[in-house]
Image (cartoon, rainbow, N blue to C red):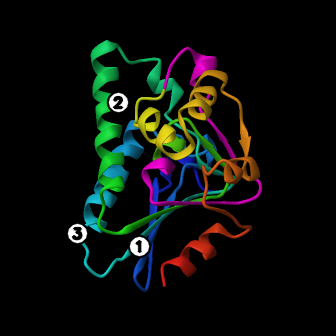
Amino acid sequence: MNDPQTLDLILTDTRQSAAIITFNRPATRNALSAEMLDRLDHVIADLTLRTDIATLIFTGRDNAFLSGANIRELTQLDQHSALLFSERGQRLFQRIATSQQRTVAAINGYCMGGGLDFALACDLRIATPAAEFAHPGAQLGIITGWGGTQRLPLLIGRIRAMEFFTTARRLSAIEAFNIGLVDAVDAFPLQYSLHLST
């Protein structure tokens, strides 16, 4: 069995004109650590320069897409380092939002907090029926800092977004589809996304 510490944090695979980027920290439900953000930043920088890649598809290992920022790391931040960490994520997610390639979040499970912010930066969101969505910051006394407070109201409306942020309630994939948070629900979101890329 692989030691989680030795796993490549981000896996990439190219299929014709699509690049599949897989978050590979299953032991932490793909929490976005500083190290993972660094690795993802390099991967995105390389892929967005490639003219042979038309679509970037993001997905996660096991039963998680992205479970948000690494809480242990967040508790170690002071006011200054918290601001830098927030700005770092914002720059990365904005690069995805403005990429010339089509970006698709193939959401295969938990999509929480900063992970949901990531999905919101993508052009399309395709979820499995078992996927769950939440911004749990209200339970922790924090609020997301990676652009979700701006992107979510544009997608589902201000009132629904405010409820989402203040209650930390989890939404099922069907509920997320019904309010326009995801574009489709499919048992095989990666295959669905690859079909869209052709």
Element type at marker 2?
helix
SS class, disc 3: loop
Left or right of 67: which side holds 36?
Answer: left
Residue visible at 29% across and 67% down in the picture: 100
Residue 168 location, x and y as percent? 66, 27
Q: Please identify the quarter of the rendering in which residue 36 is found.
A: top left
Q: Please report whichever mark, 3 or 2, sits nearer to the chain's N-terminal start.
A: 3
Three-letter amino acid code at the position of disc 3:
Leu
Q: Where is residue 183 in the image (x, y as percent from the top left)?
A: 60, 60
Name the foreground residue: 145 vs 174: 174
Residue 21: give x, y in percent of width and height: 46, 64
Q: Residues within 10 Å of mark 3 (few under 14, many from 20)?
A: few
Q: Quadrant of residue 127?
A: bottom right
- Precedes in sequence: disc 2 or disc 1: 1
Magenta run includes residue 118 = no
**Image quadrant occupied by the N terminus:** bottom right
Q: Which label number is shown at residue 86?
A: 2
Q: Residue at x 29, y 32 (%)?
A: 87
Residue 123 lies in the magenta stretch: yes
Instruction: Give the vertical position of 198 relative to 126 (above or below).
Output: below
Tell me whether the residue at label 1 lies in contact with that at label 3, contact meaning CB atoms closer than 8 angstroms: no
The residue nearer to you, when weighing 125 against 187, is: 125
- Structural distance between the alpha carbons of marks 1 and 3: 12 Å
List the residue tagged with mark 1.
55
* Tag 1: amino acid: Thr
* Residue that numbered label 3 is attached to: 49
Q: How crowded is mark 2: few (under 14 residues within 10 Å), some or many (20 or more)?
A: some
Q: How crowded is mark 1: few (under 14 residues within 10 Å), some or many (20 or more)?
A: many
Q: What stretch is highlighted in magenta?
A: 119-143
